[in-house]
Amino acid sequence: MKPKVYLETTIISYLAARPSRDLIVAANQQVTQDWWQMRRAAFDMFVSEAVIEEASGGDEKAARQRLEEIENIPLLALTAEAATLAEKLIQALPLPARAVTDAVHVAIAATNGMDYLLTWNCKHLANAVLRSKIDDTCREYGYEPPVICTPQELMEV
């Protein structure tokens, strides 16, 4: 059985975006493309309505391209259990109001038994300072947290 990976919206955004002029962002976009081409087949991939909603925003053409990238990826629902866990994560973490969806991504991934949550959001998700609080909160409410990482961390060695 393949490991299960939840694709957070930044992955889809980096995958579908025009190359950035910012060198770090451009490098992350390339790593995302490399992971998509070389590693995605090693995983069962999932997204959620939260990803669909975020990917649908902004420029219409770009949104259409983002949605095309994930149109055949199974969709995970925001269940009552995930909503409750998201609330607990919001209480446990110092997240600003605009980052509430980040807690939803973690909660959906955890309640659905994802092995990994793949993201480029290093401020609120793939963050070493927050990781233990995320893990502890998930476990406190009976869920094994996913490993939250970037595509670079999920490349084959």
Image: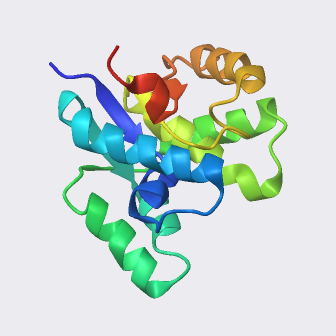
Residue 25: % across, % down: 60, 51
Compared to residue 57, the image places residue 94 above or below, namely above
Compared to residue 137, the image places residue 74 above or below, namely below
Locate residue 69 relative to residue 10 in the image: left or right: left
Q: How many numbered discs sit on the rendered protein?
A: 0
The outermost residue toward the left is 1
Locate residue 135 relative to residue 94 in the image: left or right: left
Locate residue 138 relative to residue 2 in the image: left or right: right
At 20% from the left and 28% from the top, the residue drawn is 42
- Which residue is nearer to you in this view: 134 or 119? 119
At 62% from the left and 18% from the top, the residue drawn is 135
Image quadrant holding the N terminus, namely top left
- Which residue is nearer to you in this view: 16 or 112? 16
Residue 102: % across, % down: 63, 46
Locate residue 117 relative to residue 112 in the image: left or right: right
Residue 54: % across, % down: 52, 65
Image quadrant holding the C terminus, namely top left
At 46% from the left and 66% from the top, the residue drawn is 17
Compared to residue 102, the image places residue 132 above or below, namely above
At 68% from the left and 21% from the top, the residue drawn is 131
Residue 45: % across, % down: 28, 40
Q: How is the image coloured?
A: rainbow
